[in-house]
Amino acid sequence: MAEPNVVLVTGASSGLGRLIVEALGAAGYRTFAGMRGIDGRNARSASELRAIGVTPIELDVTDEANCEAAVRAVIVQAGRIDVLINNAGIGLHGLTECFTPEEITRLFDTNFLGVVRMNRAVLPYMRAKDAGLILHMSSGGGRALLPCMAYYCASKFALEALAESYRYELANLGIDCVIVEPGSYPSPFWGKEPGPADNSRAADYRPVADLPAHMRAVYASRTEGAYASDPKEVAEACLTLIRMAPGTRPVRFLVGDRVQEVSAINDAQATVQKSFYAAYGVEHLMTFQSPVRGDRR
């Protein structure tokens, strides 16, 4: 029997990340759960995961040295990393003008640069074996935006561009990249964000000043109680993608019935992207192929 795939998941202490590592562990994958404070703030979560065979790894995606150290720790313990799931993320919710540059920098440092750091840490090991899979956890908000979520959506728009560029640059090296776009799911994600630091500016917005509260209430109505979708669908989507054969995975993978409208944008994007690559004579980059081992020409 072949060894289980080795999977590293970022932001795995709670929410979707926690569900993903639990599902991977139950399915027999050798799973590493990246999180901050495994001996401190997340000690309980780390202990619970160890009990089900998942290995917690100290990982802060905003710290480049820590990202490199976490990846090396997985390599030392498991010998390789077959799958990286870039799940770590934070949110901002409120009137756009009310957020300070410092708050926006923090958001992009996690949601965008965190992915840059992790991919740079993992890819040398994947390239060395001409194989690998990177799942980028985006959102329906990475394709269509909502009021009061401008910076969160902007960070996911940026992630989508980064991940798709990686896909085409790595496709001929035997490494697959997929963008996962979940819809609305119950999660502690939004409860962690404090709101704008400069909320005094909201007063001049008059009737629009109440928009953040309205949007939060609507979001809650879509993700709580009888109307809530099961967040385990996201974990199952990750399992589905991991189990697919290299070269058969889509560029983007929608999860849930509340995000399917985005397929129209994705279809149009695919058509335009193919045209752009053809115009520059690089359309072959859009076709996945596993290189001959040792071929470094």
Image: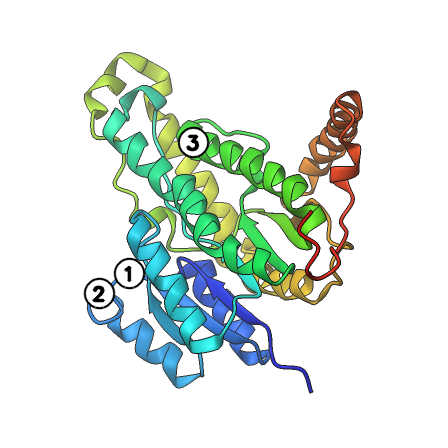
Gap between marks 3 and 1, in whole Å? 25 Å
- First in sequence, mark 3 or 1: give its number: 1
Q: Nearer the viewer, residue 229 or 281?
A: 281
Mark 2 surroundings: few (<14), some (14-19) or many (≥20) residues within 10 A: few
Gap between marks 1 and 2, in whole Å? 8 Å
- Residue at numbered disc 3: 149
Give the image location of residue 207, x and y in percent: 36, 17
- Residue at numbered disc 2: 41
Element under label 1? loop
- The answer to whether residue 49 is seen in the rendering is yes
Pointers 1 and 2 in contact (C-beta within 8 Å): yes
Image position of 238 with respect to 48: above or below: above
Image position of 174 with respect to 279: above or below: below
Image position of 4 with respect to 255: above or below: below
The residue positioned 37% from the left and 69% from the top of the image is 73
User: Is the N terminus in the top left, top right, bottom left or bottom right quadrant?
Assistant: bottom right
What is the three-letter code of the residue carrying label 2?
Answer: Arg
The residue positioned 32% from the left and 72% from the top of the image is 45
Q: Quadrant of residue 209?
A: top left
What is the three-letter code of the residue carrying label 1?
Answer: Arg
Q: Which of the colour schemes (rainbow, by chain, secondary structure, one colour) is used?
A: rainbow
Gap between marks 3 and 2, in whole Å? 28 Å
Element under label 2? loop
What is the three-letter code of the residue carrying label 3?
Answer: Met
Residue 36: mark: 1
Element under label 3? loop
- Lateral position of residue 203 relative to residue 91, left or right: left
- First in sequence, mark 3 or 2: give its number: 2
- Lateral position of residue 296 relative to residue 41, left or right: right
Pointers 3 and 1 in contact (C-beta within 8 Å): no
- First in sequence, mark 1 or 2: give its number: 1
Give the image location of residue 21, x and y in percent: 48, 69
